[in-house]
Image (cartoon, rainbow, N blue to C red):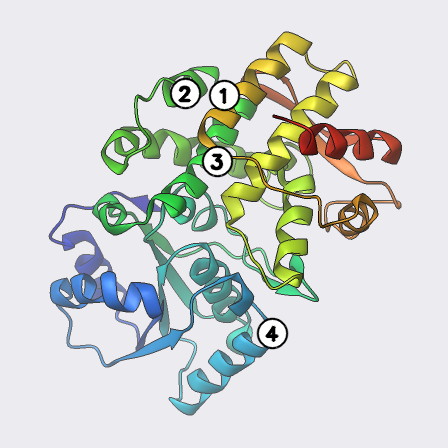
Amino acid sequence: MVSFPDEDFFQLNTYLDELKPSKLFILVDENTHGHCLPTLLGNLETSLPFEILEIESGEEMKTLTTAAHLWEILAEFEADRKALLINLGGGVITDLGGFVASTYKRGIKFINIPTTLLAMCDASIGGKTGIDHQFIKNIIGTFAAADHVFVYPDFLKSLPFAELRSGFAEMLKHGLIADEKHWEDLIALPDLEAEQVFPHIKRSMDIKLEIVEQDFREQNIRKTLNFGHTVGHAIESIHLESGKPILHGEAVAAGMICEAWLSANEKIIAPEEANRIIENIRRFFPPIDLSAFPGEDLVDLMRKDKKNSRNRINFSLPEKIGRARYDVHIPEENIYHALHYYQNLT
């Protein structure tokens, strides 16, 4: 269940009062510890014992090593199956925290309080948890839905612009695969500012939830949510491996440009429609320099993508703005052409 609570955190407090967990654990990173945790703790009205679990920020923390450390802490504090984990943070915290909770003692309840636009519109909802391994994105994970998601848009007011833009990429994707009006509303925004984005968050979340409800375990239509991610995850992973990580949304935006080009090249979408997608994404996202990374390395990472089957790289591609298809096999030669196209955009 997803709630957009009032600022007084009444719904969260009511939820905790009704659930009555045995212990409360709050997972944060160094950023949300400073910017968001004081707000949460200042509004909690509970006598429950709680512990703060803090990790360093960044995608590089989404590993088995971090997960094992958190499992050990939960065990040290004698967390039982009635314990509750609150994930207060962005995509890394909700992905990692959900994975830790869903695997500790075969599963304890967890809730998400997303603090970034990316987490609000994407990572905190839909029931996917995950960690990276050997620089491959989310290769280890579970399908486990948060018991509840509480969204407080005011947390976005302290968000750096780059983080806001990163989440905006997922919002654009939701429009491109499922709701033309949502896409048109987003590209019409005069400025990419938190206050301008606020009114559109719920619709973006609803699009994802509507798709997930039809296909929780990603056997068919949920795969459309992967538009931009086959190429995007490869770009994100190779930067992570190089020691120069980039934000998820930046990589996905680059991926959507490449994959819109692929869709036109495969005659799935009209060229003028693909060009409109590409031009508008480029308005918001500066190009990523891929010259240091051989195309062969990027394609090799795409081969390892968890969505593939039978040794084929599968794509989800737009048919038009507002509709997409999934399980599209693209010859590797054309993937190289798409990467070359992106690298040579001016």
Packing grade of label 1 (10 A; few <14, some 14-19, many >=20) is some
Numbered circle sitting on residue 169: 3
Packing grade of label 2 (10 A; few <14, some 14-19, many >=20) is some
Label 1 is placed on what type of residue? Asn
Q: Are marks 2 and 1 in contact (CB under 8 Å)?
A: yes
Q: Are marks 1 and 4 in contact (CB under 8 Å)?
A: no
> Left or right of 154: which side holds 323?
right
In the picture of the structure, the residue carrying the numbered disc 4 is: 64
329 in relation to 108, above or below: above
Label 2 is placed on what type of residue? Ile
> Left or right of 197: which side holds 97?
right
Q: Nearer the viewer, mark 4 or mark 2?
A: 2
Q: Nearer the viewer, mark 3 or mark 1?
A: 1
**Structural distance between the alpha carbons of marks 3 and 1:** 11 Å
Q: Nearer the viewer, mark 1 or mark 4?
A: 1
**Structural distance between the alpha carbons of marks 4 and 2:** 38 Å
Quarter of the image for the C terminus: give it. Answer: top right
Label 3 is placed on what type of residue? Ala
In the picture of the structure, the residue carrying the numbered disc 2 is: 187
**Structural distance between the alpha carbons of marks 3 and 2:** 11 Å
Nearer-N-terminus badge (3/2):
3
In the picture of the structure, the residue carrying the numbered disc 1 is: 280
For the view shown, which residue lies furthest in the bottom direction? 76
**Structural distance between the alpha carbons of marks 1 and 4:** 38 Å
Label 4 is placed on what type of residue? Leu
> Left or right of 240: which side holds 146?
left
Q: In the rendering, at what x and y percent does residue 158 appear?
A: 24, 51
Nearer-N-terminus badge (1/4):
4
Q: In the rendering, at what x and y percent does residue 324 appear?
A: 63, 23
Q: Which residue is at 32% across, 64% downward?
A: 31
Q: Are marks 3 and 2 in contact (CB under 8 Å)?
A: no
